[in-house]
Amino acid sequence: MTPTGLDVVIPTLNAGATLAATLAALQGDLAITITVCDGGSSDDTAAIAREAGATVVTAPAGRGSQLAVGAGVGDASWILFLHADTVLTPGWTNAVRAFTSRHINIGKAGYFRLRFASADPGARRVERLAAWRAHRLGLPYGDQGLLMARALYEYLGGFKPLPLMEDVDLVRRVGRKNLVSLDADSVTSAARYERDGWTMRPLRNLSCLTLYLTGMPPAVVARLYGR
């Protein structure tokens, strides 16, 4: 199945410091439309998005709600969900083209290799952990992007309006065997890890994931996470 267009959906909330770089990296030879679904920013996020040619829509704050609204705006055959502080490396269009050109992938979802915008050795350790988690457990996070056919997204019921773990919830419905690592990197901001520490932040994330997988309501996990 060859792509007949790609909708890129980006949830934002006061993302003015990072959004311009994210949008600039999306320039390429694919026919794409970009929807920025904003959760009530008070900075220049919307202006930056519009200047880059993106459509801006508003949604209740929370990535799950925002992503669901953004996905409903376009009608392209393929959707790429991307965070506002994630920059795709130049080979991303080739990786997307290779994935979407195979008919078998209509029932699968692709994710990029996680990289952090940091030279700290701790960043490399967390990247390796993320690669293991995505491959072995089938749990890539949203900062790795998620590419899937619109038909699959709709069949699975789309994103749920969760305050946290909306990405985990969706990829679990996709299923580990239906997740494919794409041959390109997503370089995401290291700000939270540099603030909290390259050991403590992953432990905090792992604790929240464990609580969620053992049945704790996402709203409770979100409070513990500090969102």
Image (cartoon, rainbow, N blue to C red):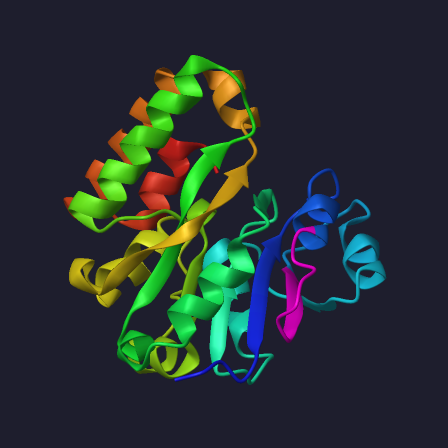
Q: Quadrant of residue 99?
A: bottom left
As rendered, which of 61 and 170 lies closer to the eye? 170
Tell me if residue 213 can be seen.
no
Residue 55: percent from the left, percent from the top? 73, 70
Residue pictured at 41% horizontal, 74% vertical: 100
Magenta residue check for 26: yes
Q: Is residue 5 left or right of residue 34?
A: left
Residue pictured at 38% horizontal, 72% vertical: 158
Residue 112: percent from the left, percent from the top? 42, 50
Residue pictured at 80% horizontal, 60% vertical: 52
Magenta residue check for 100: no
From the viewer's perspective, is residue 96 above or below residue 150? above
Residue pictured at 40% horizontal, 16% vertical: 122
Magenta range: 25-37
Tell me if residue 77 can be seen.
yes
Residue 144: percent from the left, percent from the top? 43, 48
Q: Is residue 117 left or right of residue 179?
A: right
Q: Is residue 75 left or right of residue 98?
A: right
Q: Quadrant of residue 148?
A: bottom left
As rendered, which of 119 and 183 lies closer to the eye? 183
